[in-house]
Amino acid sequence: MFHIWKRKAEKSILEPSGWPEGDNIPKHVAIIMDGNGRWAKKRGMPRIAGHHAGMKTVKRVTIAADDIGVEILTLYAFSTENWTRPQEEVDFLMRLPQEFLKIELNELIEKNVQVRMTGWREGLPAHTLQALDEAEAKTKNNTGLILNFALNYGSRREIADAARLLAEDALNGKISLGDITEESLADKLLTANISDPDLLIRTSGELRLSNFMLWQLAYTEFWFSPRFWPAFTKQDFYDAIREYQQRTRRYGGLK
Ligand code: V0D
């Protein structure tokens, strides 16, 4: 029995504990945190109870990512399409950042985590922005994990905005048409200061991108979990990392 386990362990650079190791840890992991409402419904609870439970997983996965040396963790918390949900659900969601930060900000500071946001500030309630601003300000000099919340984010609008900004520069004579390149467009995206994700995880069994980082995910490895986000474990996260390590190791051999 032992030698079978051992062989498997060597093959997947797996510690017996299940911790991924090696030098091929993805630098940037992005997650679509899906299935909170369905997790709650399955338990006869209102959807908002699932959103609330999802915060525990945010904490769990942040620690797990930090522990193995992930540099950037982007979590898709609220899309530009989510405004069409019932008003009371939106109101509840908009209180989660401050609730999360009230409990977790001190520990994030202790762990040298930088809190950031990718998305549009317009449309967010003042109380939400205040919590985000405080977290960003208090962690801006930290040098550890970047915990990046995609909040009021949508990728098509992001790309259209970038195109408009480049067109504006061209009309004003600041650039010529030849200066419109992959690089100059990427520089106008909301993610201009952040590397593209190496690994995308989506929970709850849905197999689509839902307008998330369409440009940035061009070369990203995808990993889908059938688990609803509140039930997503540290081990699930490490399973995704290990699979990523195996995939890139294979492709690395061909390069
Ligand atoms: C609900 C599951 C943490 C996904 C997780 C406003 C949907 C729980 C935050 C958060 C949400 C955001 C910014 C920040 C600190 C925490 C959060 C939203 C939803 C949308 F600086 N969880 N969380 N934000 N959910």
Image (cartoon, helix red, strand yellow):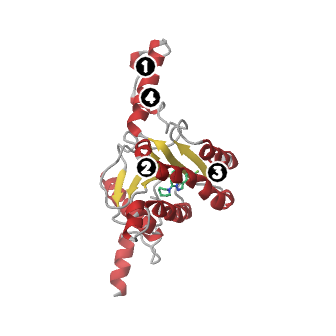
Judge: label 2 CB < 8 Å from ligand 1: no
Nearer the observer: mark 3 or 2; the answer is 2
Q: Nearer the viewer, residue 147 or 93?
A: 93
Q: Give 229 or 242, whichever is nearer the viewer.
A: 229
Label 2 residue SS: loop
Tell me which numbered mark, 2 or 1, is placed earlier along the sequence.
Answer: 2
67 relative to 80, above or below: below
Q: Report the residue at 50% width, 40% height from top.
A: 119
Q: In the rendered structure, are the residues bearing label 4 and label 2 in contact, judged by CB atoms less than 8 Å apart?
A: no
Q: Which mark is residue 167?
A: 1
- Label 2 or label 1, whichever lies nearer to me, is 2
| Count of residue discs | 4
Mark 2 and 1 residues: CB-CB less than 8 Å, in contact? no
SS of the residue under disc 4: helix
**Residue denoted by label 2:** 86
Q: Residue 162 carries which label?
A: 4
Amino acid at the residue labelled 4: Ala
* Residue drawn at 38 percent across, 60 percent down: 203
Measure the alpha-carbon separation of dots 3 and 2: 39 Å
- Disc nearer the start of the sequence (3/1): 3
Q: For the residue marked with disc 3, what is the amino acid?
A: Thr
Q: Nearer the viewer, residue 24 or 123?
A: 123
- In this rendering, the label closer to the viewer, 4 or 2: 2
Identify the disc placed on residue 238: none
